[in-house]
C-alpha cells in the first residue's frame, strides 16, 4: 500500500498483535475482513505529538518517525520479537511467485533478527514496538526516533552521539569503533546507551522503502 497521511486512531501502534491486516476478522469464520481503513503495508509519518498520542505507555512512548503495518513471519522466533528489538527481511521463500515468475522482496513481512534473510546480514532493519505473535500483524518503526533494547553488555563506551549496531537476537550494541558505519549500523544514540535496557536512537543508515 502507499503512504497514508491518516492513521486510524482507534488503536495504539505499540499494542497491536492482530490476526488480520485490517484488525477485523469474521466472528464465524475467522477470516480477514477488509474494513476500517487499515491495510497491509500502510505506513505513516507521525510527529512527536501524534506518535505520543498513539502510544500504549505500558509498552513505551513513541516518537516522531515512520511506522508501518506488517506481518511477522510465522517462522520468527517469538522471544526475539518484543519492544526494542530489531527485525529483518525474511527469506524470499515466504512470498509466492508473482505473475512474472519471480518473488517480490517482502517489504511488509518481517521476521526476528535470527531468522533474517541470508547469514550475518542486516537487510531492511526495523524496530519492533511490542511483542507480536509470529503469524500475526502489528506495527514496526523504520525511520525516526526509535527505542531499542541494549545488549546484555556493551562492547564500546556508552555516550550520546555514538553509532549503534544491531547484534544477536536483535539487540543493540555500542561497537568498539563508534564512528565507523557498517552494514549492521542502525542509528545514532540520542540517549546514553544502556546494557539490557531501553534507550533511544535516531534511525540512520537504513533503507527507505515503499510497497
Image (cartoon, helix red, strand yellow):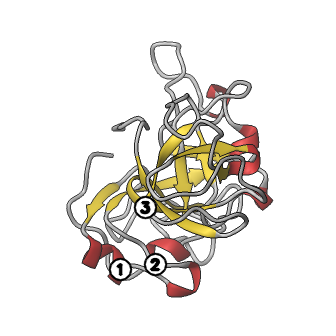
Q: Quick check: 98 left or right of 135?
A: left
Residue for point 56% across, 31% down: 123
Judge by depth and name the residue closer to the eye, 99 or 138. 138
User: Looking at the rendering, which quadrant does residue 78 occupy?
Assistant: bottom right
Percent of width and height locating residue 68: 41, 55
Compared to residue 114, the image places residue 104 above or below, namely: above
Q: Is residue 169 left or right of residue 163?
A: right
Q: CA distance from mark 1 to mark 3?
A: 18 Å
Q: Mark 2 highlights which residue?
A: 61
Q: Residue 155's spot in the image, x, y percent? A: 72, 47
State the CA–CA distance, disc 2 to disc 1.
Answer: 6 Å
Seen in the image, is 8 located left or right of residue 125? left
Residue on which the image places disc 3: 190
> Dot 2: what SS?
loop
Circle 2 packing at 10 Å, graded few (<14), some (14-19), many (20+), is some
Q: Position of residue 120 (x, y in %)?
A: 72, 28
Q: How far apart are the two marked residues, 2 and 3, measured between alpha carbons? A: 15 Å
Frontmost residue, 104 versus 126: 126
SS class of the residue under badge 1? helix
Judge whether 178 appears above or below 121 on screen.
Answer: below
Q: Which residue is mark 1?
A: 52
User: Is residue 74 visible in the rendered structure shown here?
Assistant: no
Amino acid at each position: 500500500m502507499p503512504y497514508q497521511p491518516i492513521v486510524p486512531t482507534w488503536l495504539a501502534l505499540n499494542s497491536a498483535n492482530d490476526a488480520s491486516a485490517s484488525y477485523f476478522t469474521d466472528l464465524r469464520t475467522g477470516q480477514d475482513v477488509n474494513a476500517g481503513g487499515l491495510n497491509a503495508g500502510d505506513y505513516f509519518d507521525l510527529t512527536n505529538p501524534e506518535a505520543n498520542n498513539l502510544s500504549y505507555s505500558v509498552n513505551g512512548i513513541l516518537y516522531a518517525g515512520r511506522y508501518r503495518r506488517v506481518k511477522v513471519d510465522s517462522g520468527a522466533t517469538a522471544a526475539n520479537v518484543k519492544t526494542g528489538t530489531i527485525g529483518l527481511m525474511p527469506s524470499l521463500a515466504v512470498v509466492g511467485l508473482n505473475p512474472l515468475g519471480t518473488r517480490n522482496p517482502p517489504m511488509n513481512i518481517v521476521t526476528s533478527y535470527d531468522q533474517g534473510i541470508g547469514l550475518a546480514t542486516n537487510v531492511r532493519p526495523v524496530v519492533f514496538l511490542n511483542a507480536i505473535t509470529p503469524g500475526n500483524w502489528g506495527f514496526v518503526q523504520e525511520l525516526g526516533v526509535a527505542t531499542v533494547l541494549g545488549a546484555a553488555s556493551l562492547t564500546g563506551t556508552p555516550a550520546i552521539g555514538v553509532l549503534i549496531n544491531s547484534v544477536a537476537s536483535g539487540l543493540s550494541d555500542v561497537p568498539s569503533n563508534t564512528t565507523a558505519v557498517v552494514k549492521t549500523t542502525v542509528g545514532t544514540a540520542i540517549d546514553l546507551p544502556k546494557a539490557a535496557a531501553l534507550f533511544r536512537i535516531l534511525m540512520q543508515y537504513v533503507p527507505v522503502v515503499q510497497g
